[in-house]
Image (tube, coloured by chain):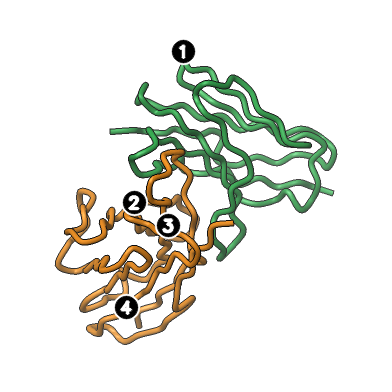
Chain colours: A orange, B green
Amino acid sequence: GAVVSQHPSWVICKSGTSVKIECRSLDFQATTMFWYRQFPKQSLMLMATSNEGSKATYEQGVEKDKFLINHASLTLSTLTVTSAHPEDSSFYICSARETGVWTGELFFGEGSRLTVL
Amino acid sequence: GENVEQHPSTLSVQEGDSAVIKCTYSDSASNYFPWYKQELGKRPQLIIDIRSNVGEKKDQRIAVTLNKTAKHFSLHITETQPEDSAVYFCAATTGNTPLVFGKGTRLSVIA
């Protein structure tokens, strides 16, 4: 089956530093990947849509200069949380849709738990 | 854009009883409706999905029904077991748009 790998699975950083999270589709190509954020006891909220070779599309209220997304290849998207603050502490989950397959199904990475001290 | 409402937010059932979770969606163009089970600290796991050309789908103890006219779909779990305890999310998409999730239902199965 389609596998999406995400790492790191957890990271602790100091306030003001930047953290990069990688999302890879291991056995399929993904022109489009999605980044979600999940706060404790809440639902998954879409942050942005990552498009290979072009700029990401951000949801309303998500700062594009703070959450940098790069999708340089068909199997890799990265999310960089710049100048992280404690309120950025959350569970970040990426997901990918197989290129050319229009079923709607998404495959999720394992998630990355970010704690900003 | 799509808006998905999910009820109830919490649900407690006795082991062996049935559990039903309901969702409504707003975009009539949505045609794919998955249900996910999420355990604490883990990624959502797809448990069943349904497409708009089907009214009902069943997989062992789990079933999903879809009413396109009313724009609602439901998850039914029969003969619940303690290991069914988790948070369940419904979602909807048109197929080439992002999945929009409901707010989740925390299911507790009491032994």
| 10 Å crowding of disc 4: few (<14), some (14-19), many (20+) | some
Give the alpha-carbon distance from disc 2 to disc 1, as whole Å: 27 Å
Give the alpha-carbon distance from disc 1 to disc 4, as whole Å: 44 Å
Which chain does the residue under circle 1 lie in? B
Quadrant for the N terminus of chain A in the image: bottom right
- Say which residue label 2 marks: A46
- Say which residue label 1 marks: B69
Look at label 3 and name its amino acid.
Ser
Q: Is residue A60 above or below residue B6?
A: below
Which numbered tag is attached to residue A95? 3
Taking the image as shown, residue A104 lies to the left or right of residue A48, namely right
Q: Secondary structure at mark 2?
A: strand
Q: Position of residue A21 (x, y in %)?
A: 36, 74
Look at label 2 and name its amino acid.
Leu
Question: Residue at point 20% right, 48% down?
Answer: A60
Q: Position of residue A115 (x, y in %)?
A: 40, 77
